[in-house]
Amino acid sequence: MINRKLITLFIILSLTLLLLQATGCSKKNLALPSSVDRQPPVIKEEKAEETLLKISPRALASLQLTNQGLALLQSSRPDDAIRIFERSISLDTYNGQNYYYMAEAWIMKDNKQQAMEFNQLAEIYLKSDANWTDWAILVTKQRERILGI
C-alpha cells in the first residue's frame, strides 16, 4: 500500500504548483485571452499546507482539471475545455470556479443560453468561496459580457 505520508506530500506539492501558477510565481505563467478574467487565488499561500491537508482527493483532482481546462481556454480551445470542466464538475460539484470557466468557454462559442446558465451556477457556488468579493466582480462582469452576445 502507498504510504500515507507520500500521498500527503504529493497533494501538498500538487497544490503548491497550482498556487504558484494562480499567483503568477511559476516560470510557465500563461496569459489569459482578453475575454477571460484572471481568477483570484484559491488558497492564501501562508495557509496553503494547512488547507491542503483538508482537501479531499476528489477536490484535488477537480482543481487539477480546472487548471487544465483554464489552460485550454487560454489556448482558445473551448470545446476541449468544456470536456475537462465537465469532468472536473463531476468530481466536485461545489467548485464554483468550474462553472465560471465553463461559462467562459460557452462565451467563446457565442452560446448565450449555456453561458448564462453556467454564470448563474458560478454565482451560486462561489458565494461560499472565501474570495467571494473578488469573484462577485468577475461573475458580474461575465454576466454583462454574456448579455452582449
Image (cartoon, helix red, strand yellow):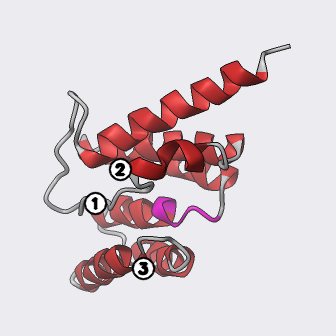
Q: Are marks 1 and 2 in contact (CB under 8 Å)?
A: yes
Based on the displayed image, in which of its 4 quarters is residue 8 positioned? top right
Residue 72 in view (yes/no): no
What percent of the width, then of the height, locates residue 64? 51, 39
Based on the displayed image, in which of its 4 quarters is residue 12 positioned? top right
Q: Is residue 142 left or right of residue 127?
A: left
Which quadrant of the rendered structure holds the N terminus? top right
**Chain-order first, disc 3 or disc 1:** 1
Is residue 143 placed above or below 19 in the rendered structure?
below
Mark 2, residues whose alpha carbon is within 10 Å: few (<14), some, or many (≥20)? many
Q: Which label is found at residue 108?
A: 1
Residue 35 in view (yes/no): yes
Element class at badge 2: helix
What percent of the width, then of the height, locates residue 56? 70, 46
Q: Three-letter amino acid code at disc 1?
A: Met
Calculate the distance from the C-alpha at mark 2 to the C-alpha at mark 3: 16 Å
Residue at image mark 3: 116
**Chain-order first, disc 2 or disc 3:** 2
Magenta stretch in the rendered image: 94-98
Q: Is residue 35 magenta?
A: no
Q: Is residue 8 left or right of residue 116?
A: right
What percent of the width, then of the height, locates residue 111? 36, 70
Element class at badge 3: helix
Q: Is residue 95 magenta?
A: yes
**Chain-order first, disc 1 or disc 2:** 2
Q: Residue furthest right?
A: 1
Residue under the point 28% across and 60% down: 108
Residue at image mark 2: 78
Q: Three-letter amino acid code at disc 3?
A: Met
Q: Three-letter amino acid code at disc 2?
A: Pro
Which quadrant of the rendered structure holds the C terminus? bottom left
Q: Residue furthest left?
A: 34
